[in-house]
Image: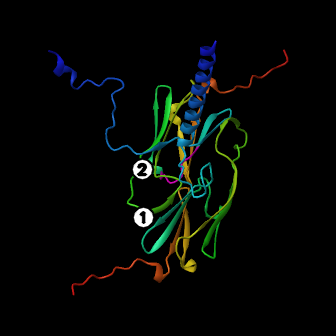
Amino acid sequence: MLTFYNDWDRSLAELRRQMSQLLDDFDADWPNTSLFGSGRTWPRINLADAGDKLLVTVEVPGLSEKDVNVAFEQDVLSITGERRVQAPEGYSIHRQERGDFKFARSISMPCRVEAEKANASVRDGVLTIALPKVPEAQPKRIEVRSS
Amino acid sequence: MNRNADLAKHEAGTPTKTAESKPTQSPLVDVYENGDELLLVADMPGVTSEEVGIHVDKDTLTIETNRKSVSGAKVLAAEFARHDYRRSFTIPHGLDIDKVKAEFSNGVLSLHLPKSPAVKPRQIQVRAG
């Protein structure tokens, strides 16, 4: 009978392993390098350094420039907006994966930027915000001379 | 001895693409239907209309993108990658595949799949006899 219980334990452990594998595979579709821990955040944001400016790109499918608000205050960039998905008039719904979102996300800048020179645009469902760095934060080349 | 003859033979399951593979992701999709058509709506942010391909093979509809790669700035934090989108659907009989229309705006693809006249709902007049 002892072996019976051992087997039972083992199959439970196997089941648990398979379950966690399943969950890991499910999560693998989403990058786990989120700015705010893991999980499904919407919209997803990338932050890049283009030398003289910082580039923030945000995936906002279905939104146009009038649907998003971008604000900057004390080194923190905030993006707010809302997306509504509605079935077109007279259609029945078979599948609805695209969701309604009301979002507010903010990220702090890794260096000082000139917010008044920033510009933001929406193109093909991606919001791009370019924030020029202050002159002191821009990369400088230091000449190496032989003495 | 007939090895040479097999060289050019393309067997099912042979990979067709050996070039660098970019990560692929399934787009989120809504499917709607009315009397005239099926309407498929897919979120594909960052893609331009030229990069979207829609293929129908027998009863399978595939949406896929082939995005140009760009030399980007140094990434500091990333929640998404510059991936391609790909998703296949089994389509029901009775759709007029030749008349499929696709629109793309703000990163959202709308695919109109009209029904062929044979399967459209018809109103049957009831007359007093």
Classify residue A97 as left or right of residue B53: right
Residue B45 located within the stretch drawn in magenta: yes
> In the rendered view, would you say B98 is above or below A39?
above
Tag shown at residue B73: 1
> In the rendered view, would you say A28 is above or below B71?
above
Chain containing mark 2: B
The total number of labels drawn is 2
Q: Residue at x 55, y 38 (%)?
A: A24
Question: Element at badge 2?
Answer: loop
Quadrant that contains the C terminus of chain B? top right
Q: Which residues are magenta?
A: B42-48
Please state which of the two labelled residues, at mark 2 or mark 1, is closer to the viewer: 1
Tag shown at residue B67: 2
Instruction: Give the alpha-carbon distance from disc 2 to disc 1, as whole Å.
Output: 17 Å
**Image location (x, y in percent) of residue A135:** 46, 83
Looking at the rendered structure, the kind of residue marked 2 is Arg
Residue B126 located within the stretch drawn in magenta: no
Which quadrant of the view contains residue A21? top right
Question: Element at badge 1?
Answer: loop
Classify residue A133 as left or right of residue A74: left
